[in-house]
Image (spheres, rainbow, N blue to C red):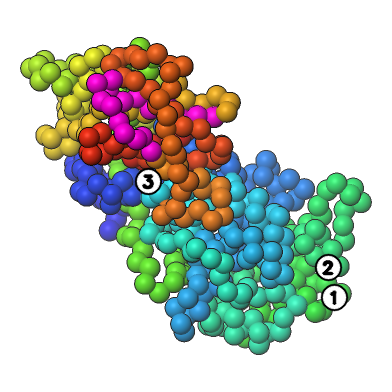
Amino acid sequence: MNFLFLLSFLLLSPYVRAAPRDERVDDELENLYFEYGTPVGPERGSRVLGGAETCNDEFRINNRNIPAEFIRLAYHDSATHNKFDGTGGLDGSIRFRAELDRPENVGAVGMFTTFLRSHSGVNQLVSWADVIAFNVVAVVAGCDGPLIPFRGGRVDATVPGPPGVPEPHQSLESHTESFRRQGFNKEEMIGLVACGHTLGGVRSLDFPDHVAPSPDNDQDNIHLFDTTHTFDNAVVTEYLSGNTQNPLVNHPNTTMLSDLRIFSSDGNKTMQRLANPNHFQRTCGNLLERMINTVPRGVKLRPPVKPIPIKAGDALLEVTATTRILRTSMRFLKANPNRKVTLHWHDTANRPNSFSALPTNVTTNVTPLASRHGMTPTRYWFEAPIGLTSVSKYWFTYDELDGRGPRKFDNKGKGFLIEQDELLFAPTLSGGFPRKLVVGLHSNLLPSAVTGTIFDFNNEATTPTQGAPLTFQRDTSIPDAAGYSFYSASFSSAHGATFDVQALVNGKAIKAEFLRVSYI
C-alpha cells in the first residue's frame, strides 16, 4: 500500500484500542519505531540505542562505528538458528554471558556494552529480541541505508543458544554450511556479509594478531572494512577495484581472510551485481529483514509496524502529597506550530459539566526513522490537577487552525476510561536512597497485603514472564493525603522498567499494572 495513502487513511481513522494487551503492544512497538521508545514526560525520554542513532562523527570514536556493533550483535544472536530443527535465531539469547563469552563471540565486552544500550526499550510488552532487531532497523536507516520493515513479537530465550557463529579463520566450506543452517544460500551469504561489513571494521582488542594495537595503550585500534562511514556499497566497489583496506580481504595473514574467501566464492558474480548501488540497497534491505525475522519455530511475529498519525499517550492518574494529577499526552506524527490541543474530562460525581486543561509542554522528538518517513513526532503534555472527585474518563479536542474547526479525539465516543482510582502510583513520593516505590490506597480500605512485581531488564535472566517480588508496607513517614494512605517497597535496581502492584482487601484484589519506574 502506498505510504502516503495509508497515512491519509489513518488520519481519517483515529487509532482506537482493539484488545487491551494487543493494543498496548502495538502502541509500544509504534512508539519504539518512530520515537525510539515511550516517553513518559517532556523531560523523561526513553530512547534506546543510547543516542547512537547515526553514523556521524560523535559515534566514530577512534574509528569505532557504534551502529555497526548493533548490526553485529543482532547477527550473532540470530546465527544460532537451525532451519532444520527450528531452534535458535534472534531470540535475545546473546544477553547471557555464557553465550557472549564463547570464542565465536569475540569482543564480548564491547558486545555487552552495546547490548546494555538497549535496556530502556525492553519491558513486559517488548522483548530483548525485539529491541535487538529494532536497533538494526534504526541504525541502518540512520546511516542512510534501506528502510527495513519492523515487526515485533519475538520471544526471549530463557537459556543461552547453541554455538553457530562463523569465525574468520574457518574455511569457506565451514562458512557456507553455517549460513545454510541459518537459512541462507551461497549468494545470500555473500550479500549478507557485504551488507554487514559496509560499517565498522576489525578491532585490535578482539584480534591483536591481525590488527596491531594502538601506540596509545588506552585506545583501541580499528581497521575499517572500507573508507566511508555510511551504509553504502564502498565495501563492494573497493574490493572489486583491488584497492580495498578491508583487513579480512587484504592482509598477510591469509588464514583470517574470510571476506576474500566468501566474496570470491562464485567468481565475484554476486559482488559485481552488488556494485550497483540501488541493487546493493535493495539486497541489503531484504537480507537484513530476513536476518532479524529469523526466529525459533513456533514464534509468530506481529504485522509490520504502521504509523499512527494521532493517538493518546500513556495515562497515569497519580496521587501526590496534596492532590491527584492526571498525566497524559496526545501525539501527532506531523508537526503544526498553529495546532491547539485541549484535554477534557468528567469527574466521578457524574456532573454534567466537563473540566479542561491546556498543555503544560509541547515537545518534538525527531528520530532518523521518523525523518526518513517525513514525520516529526510532536507530543502535547498534560498534568491536570483532578482534585478529590477524581476522573471517570477523558478525551481531547484539537484544532489545526486550517478552517475545519475543532475536532474531538475520544475513542469513538467512548472516551478514555480510568479503570480505578483506589490504588494509585505516587511517583513524586518515590525514589530517594535507598530507592523506594510508593503507592497510595484509599484510606478507608484496610488491606491484608500489598504486593507487587518489578521487572528489571538489566538482568540477563529476566524475561517478560519473570520479575522480582515487592512487598509494600504501610509508610507512616508519609502523612495521609487526598484521601489516601501510603505504602512503600524498596528496590535496588536503577533499571527497573515497570512494576505491577495489588492490594488484597476483603479477599478482593485491587490491581494497578504496567507502571513505569521512569515516572519517578
Residue placed most toward the observer, 299 or 96: 96
Q: Is residue 394 left or right of residue 431?
A: left
Q: Residue at x 90, y 48 (%)?
A: 216
Q: Amino acid at mark 3?
A: Glu
Q: Residue at x 34, y 14 (%)?
A: 481
Q: Which residues are magenta?
A: 435-451
Q: Which residue is mark 1?
A: 253
Check whether the beta carbons of the residues at disc 1 and disc 2 lie within 8 A of each other: yes
- Residue 499 sits above or below residue 358 on the image: below
Query: Was residue 438 drawn as part of the magenta stretch in this picture?
Result: yes
- Residue 227 sits above or below residue 296 on the image: above
Q: Amino acid at mark 1?
A: Asn
Where in the figure is residue 312, as x and y percent of width and height? 28, 35
Residue placed most toward the observer, 336 or 203: 203
Q: Which mark is residue 422?
A: none
Disc 3 secondary structure class: helix
Where in the figure is residue 401, as x and y percent of width and height? 24, 23
Q: Earlier in the sequence, mark 1 or mark 2?
A: 2
Question: In the rendered view of the protein, which quadrant contains the N terminus?
Answer: bottom left
Where in the figure is residue 496, as x and y percent of width and height? 50, 40
Disc 1 secondary structure class: loop
